[in-house]
Image (cartoon, grey):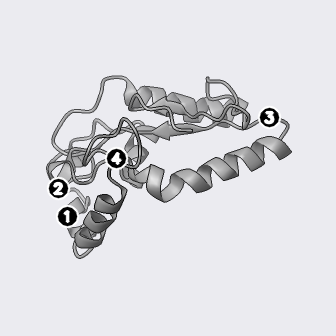
Amino acid sequence: MNGATPVRSVTAGREPAAARSGRRQRGQFPGEGAGRRSPARGGFGAGTARLAAAHARISGGRTHRYSFAYRSTALGGRLDAAHTVGLPFVFDNAHRPWLHADTRLLGPDPVPTGLAARVHGAWTAFARTGDPGWARYDPRHPAAEPLGGGAVFR
């Protein structure tokens, strides 16, 4: 296993609660079909938007926001866009074989070409310069830079 823990062992015993949550949230977000909602929208979206708006007000406009919407194909697609799915892209190692199998974080399907380089590049640019390469966040016109999917979250 190369030290990697299969996703199924991490999610064991949690799938029924996640499924109930998914049924409650399905259809709440336009453009996200049945079973294809973003967990980040329901679990993190509202708080993230409030935090970004507050930070933008006190930071002199030095706030940037993105939404990572790549959906893992692990567990038959049930893992979806879980919170940790973006980490291999941040560290530019989404291509590693130990991340790919039905019970591994990114699932059996290949990831989009260039996505890891884009995410990693944005993070390192932000660390070096404070600019990830997209417009600063404006609470009057709230939007997040979409990475790994086409949706622009507000």
3 and 1 marks in contact (CB < 8 Å)? no
Above-or-below relation of 114 to 39: above
Q: Nearer the viewer, mark 2 or mark 3?
A: 3
Give the label on residue 35, or none.
Answer: none
Q: Which residue is mark 4?
A: 37
Q: Quadrant of the N terminus?
A: bottom left
Identify the element where label 1 is drawn: helix
Q: Which residue is mark 3?
A: 61
Judging depth in this view, the residue of 19 and 15 nearest the camera is 19
Judging depth in this view, the residue of 11 and 28 nearest the camera is 28
Q: Quadrant of the C terminus?
A: top right
Identify the element where label 2 is drawn: loop
**C-alpha distance separating marks 2 and 4:** 20 Å
Q: Which residue is mark 2?
A: 103
- Kind of residue sitting beneath label 1: Arg
Point 32% across, 38% down: residue: 94
Q: Nearer the viewer, mark 2 or mark 4?
A: 4
Point 69% across, 33% down: residue: 137
Q: Which residue is mark 1?
A: 8
Q: Position of residue 29 (x, y in %)?
A: 41, 44
4 and 3 marks in contact (CB < 8 Å)? no
**C-alpha distance separating marks 2 and 3:** 41 Å
Mark toward the start of the polypeptide (1 vs 2): 1
Q: How many marks?
A: 4
Q: Position of residue 46 (x, y in %)?
A: 57, 53
Mark toward the start of the polypeptide (2 vs 4): 4
